[in-house]
Amino acid sequence: MFPMIISVEEVRALKKEIEIYKQELRDEGKAFDESIEIGVMVETPAAATIARHLAKEVDFFSIGTNDLTQYTLAVDRGNDMISHLYQPMSPSVLNLIKQVIDASHAEGKWTGMCGELAGDERATLLLLGMGLDEFSMSAISIPRIKKIIRNTNFEDAKVLAEQASCSTDNGRVNDAG
């Protein structure tokens, strides 16, 4: 998985590097998975906004919500003076997430998510409604999120996601989840 991607050219260059290393392994007679999947870690607004192009180049996406939120909102979550502005469920962040999921699905690919938002039970229904395929979270969050997923009416989750996509208010999106 390629981190901190900002352009299609980066992905293409990295894929060429991987092919060079694969050929070296072949030449050395070493066994390896020829069909290893290549993915992009979507952590930058740049990657999110070109997701439809990136999806043609890779097998999957993993959305890194901590960095994506920080870079989208231009907020240093470690700075106590402005950390209250760090809101992963802001409409701008959620719209980028939806854009990435839609781009991957349009190409028949899957999208996972890591970061605090993936394990936030207030966001689970919303993310399911957006079509998120995989959640990666700390072990302590798994039972709560699993219970929510098992009890989810996916049509209701889609309606919730649609309503959230129309919101311009952080508070309303947070209340929706």
Image: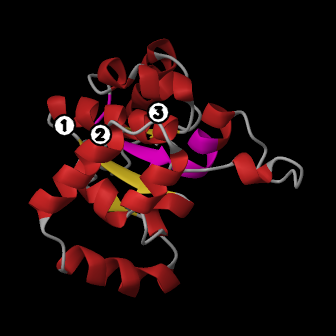
Q: Nearer the viewer, residue 37 or 6?
A: 6
Q: Nearer the viewer, residue 148 or 7?
A: 148
Identified at 89% across, 50% down, the residue is: 81
- Residue 4 screen position, x and y as percent: 59, 34
Task: Identify the secondary structure beneath mark 3.
Answer: helix
Q: Nearer the viewer, mark 2 or mark 3?
A: 2
Q: Amino acid at mark 2?
A: Ile
How many other residues sit within 10 Å of disc 1, few (<14), some (14-19) or many (≥20)?
some
Quadrant the C terminus occupies: bottom left
Specify whether 17 is left or right of 35. Answer: right
- The residue to which callout 2 is attached is 101
Residue 153 lies in the magenta-colored region:
no
Relative to 168, is 141 above or below?
below
- The residue to which callout 3 is attached is 21
- The residue to which callout 1 is attached is 105
Q: CA distance from mark 1 to mark 2?
A: 6 Å
Decide which of tag 1 and tag 3 comes sooner along the chain.
3
Q: Residue furthest top?
A: 9
Q: Amino acid at mark 3?
A: Tyr
